[in-house]
Image: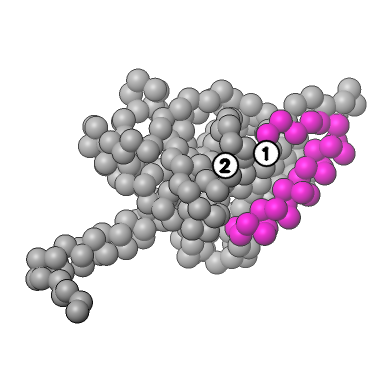
């Protein structure tokens, strides 16, 4: 015979559901700072464009601080869980009890068992785990950035670096990430550079943005370049 919930348990359960819904909606809004029409107002990780070739770019990113967490599971199932954890952190679940402005993009990266991220907000695969990271606003240093209360969230400072990117619209699915990662990798090699990381998928818009207006990217760290290449 099933045991029914008492009134107090029902209230707690309902409140948890309501809070999760509110958190997901607010975090999506904060993430991209944009509307369904694609207007973005959130701060973006800083970089300088060194080379532009249609949908491709080579950028020099500045150093940045990441807040990252690891969640077990596949690409789709880990995204919401990791995002909720990090959104809770920037909404005030930190030792300073202060909110943190979101910086775009959010990146998703396939990686090896040994995690070594060297770029913006990242989600990286490690076996059946994905690492998701938010870029912290430029005003913070490792000394001043609010410290997370969640032991699963780690703050890490990474150096700047040279990154190749490809831009596309539509859905930011694992299938599209693989497709554009291959295109970007081919372009890197054709232009005399060497890939120095696994691909990272960069998201700039919330889920409600119309697919054809979304700004999606794939990033790969690069090294080298032939003598005839500029830069």
Query: Within 10 angstroms of label 2, few (less than 14), some, or many (20 or more) residues?
Result: some
Residue found 31% across the figure and 31% down from its top: 146
x 17%, y 74%: residue? 3
* Closer to the eye: label 2 or 1: 2
In the rendering, at what x and y percent does residue 164 appear? 71, 37
Determine whether the residue tagged by mark 2 lies in a helix, strand or loop. strand
Disc 1: CA contacts within 10 A as few (<14), some (14-19) or many (>=20) = some
Q: Position of residue 82 (x, y in %)?
A: 43, 48
Give me the C-alpha separation between circle 2 and circle 1: 11 Å
**Principal SS element in the magenta part?**
helix
Q: Earlier in the sequence, mark 2 or mark 1?
A: 2
Q: Which residue is mark 1?
A: 198
Q: Residue, x 39% and y 22% (percent of image)? A: 142
Q: Farthest residue to the bottom: give it.
A: 1
Figure check: 151 above or below 74: above
Q: In the image, which residues are magenta?
A: 172-197
Judged left or right of residue 219, residue 9 is: left
Q: Say which of 11 and 107 sits in front.
A: 11
Q: Residue furthest left?
A: 7
According to the image, what is the colour scheme of the structure?
one colour
Q: Position of residue 120 (x, y in %)?
A: 54, 36
At a point 56% along the width and 33% down the height, the residue shown is 115
Q: Where the C terminus falls, by quadrant?
A: top right
Figure check: 3 above or below 17: below
Q: Position of residue 46 (x, y in %)?
A: 55, 33
Q: Residue furthest right?
A: 228
Membership of 11 in magenta stretch: no
Q: Magenta stretch: residue 175 in it? A: yes
Residue 50, numbered circle: none
Name the residue carrying label 2.
126
Q: Nearer the viewer, residue 111 or 59?
A: 111
Residue 210 seen by the camera = yes
């Amino acid at each position: 015979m099933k045991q029914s919930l008492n009134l107090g348990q029902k209230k707690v359960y309902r409140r948890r559901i309501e809070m999760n819904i509110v958190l997901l909606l607010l975090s999506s809004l904060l993430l991209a700072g944009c509307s369904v029409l694609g207007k973005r107002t959130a701060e973006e990780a800083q970089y300088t464009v060194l080379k532009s070739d249609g949908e491709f770019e080579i950028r020099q990113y500045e150093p940045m601080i990441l807040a990252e967490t690891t969640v077990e599971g596949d690409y789709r199932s880990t995204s919401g869980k990791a995002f909720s954890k990090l959104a809770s952190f920037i909404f005030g679940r930190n030792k300073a009890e202060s909110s943190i402005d979101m910086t775009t993009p959010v990146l998703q990266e396939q990686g090896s068992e040994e995690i070594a991220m060297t770029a913006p907000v990242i989600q990286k695969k490690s076996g059946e785990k994905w690492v998701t990271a938010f870029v912290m606003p430029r005003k913070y240093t490792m000394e001043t950035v609010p410290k997370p209360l969640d032991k699963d969230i780690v703050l890490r400072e990474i150096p700047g670096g040279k990154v190749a990117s490809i831009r596309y619209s539509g859905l930011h699915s694992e299938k599209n990430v693989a497709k554009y990662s291959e295109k970007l990798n081919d372009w890197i090699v054709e232009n005399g550079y060497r890939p120095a990381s696994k691909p990272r998928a960069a998201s700039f818009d919330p889920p409600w943005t119309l697919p054809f207006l979304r700004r999606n990217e794939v990033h790969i760290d690069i090294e080298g370049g032939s003598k005839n290449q500029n830069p």
